[in-house]
Amino acid sequence: MTERGATEDVLPEQGLSVTEAARQLSVSRVALFRVLHGKAAISTDMALRLEAWINGPTAETWGHVQADRDLWQACQRPVTRHCIRLRRDHANTDSSISHTHHGNGRGTRVRSPSVAAPV
């Protein structure tokens, strides 16, 4: 969630500052500020508070919004893009081929699970 989306839509509509909104949500101003600025995730607890406070999205919807944002952010990282490419390569080859797994820092040989390429 970005401040632009939250503060330009919800907070001014309610005539609220971040400080007042945080008070009504029973969270610290810093916690709300961090969520609004995309510096902190929307926790399950925050999603439940938002659902109760805003007559609109459910806690489940807030959770989906956060999951979508997390997935988008992960896909932007070069390492993740590399892993996705490896998964696609493995889907097109014999899945029993071993490769060097660099994630544990020891270069241990591990068997690749059969992973279908994302569509």
Image (cartoon, rainbow, N blue to C red):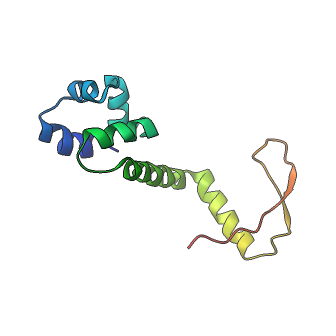
- Residue 75 placed where, x, y %? 53, 56
Quarter of the image containing the C terminus? Answer: bottom right
Kindly indicate the quadrant of the structure image that contains residue 25.
Answer: top left
Q: Residue at x 78, y 48 (%)?
A: 102
Residue 98 visible (yes or no)? yes
Residue situated in front as seen by the camera: 15 or 37 = 15
Residue situated in front as seen by the camera: 14 or 72 = 14
- Residue 74 placed where, x, y %? 54, 51
Q: Residue at x 45, y 55 (%)?
A: 68
Q: Does residue 119 sit above or below 67 in this rendering?
A: below
Q: Residue furthest front?
A: 52
- Residue 104 placed where, x, y %? 78, 43
Q: How many marks?
A: 0
Q: Does residue 86 sit above or below 78 in this rendering?
A: below
Q: Is 11 on the left-hand or right-hand side of 58?
A: left
Quarter of the image containing the N terminus? Answer: top left
Residue situated in front as seen by the camera: 81 or 33 = 33
- Residue 90 placed where, x, y %? 74, 70
Q: Residue at x 85, y 42 (%)?
A: 106
Residue situated in front as seen by the camera: 90 or 25 = 25
Q: Does residue 17 sit above or below 75 in this rendering?
A: above
Kindly indicate the quadrant of the structure image that contains residue 91.
Answer: bottom right
Kindly indicate the quadrant of the structure image that contains residue 46.
Answer: top left
Q: Residue at x 80, y 52 (%)?
A: 101
Residue 37 visible (yes or no)? no
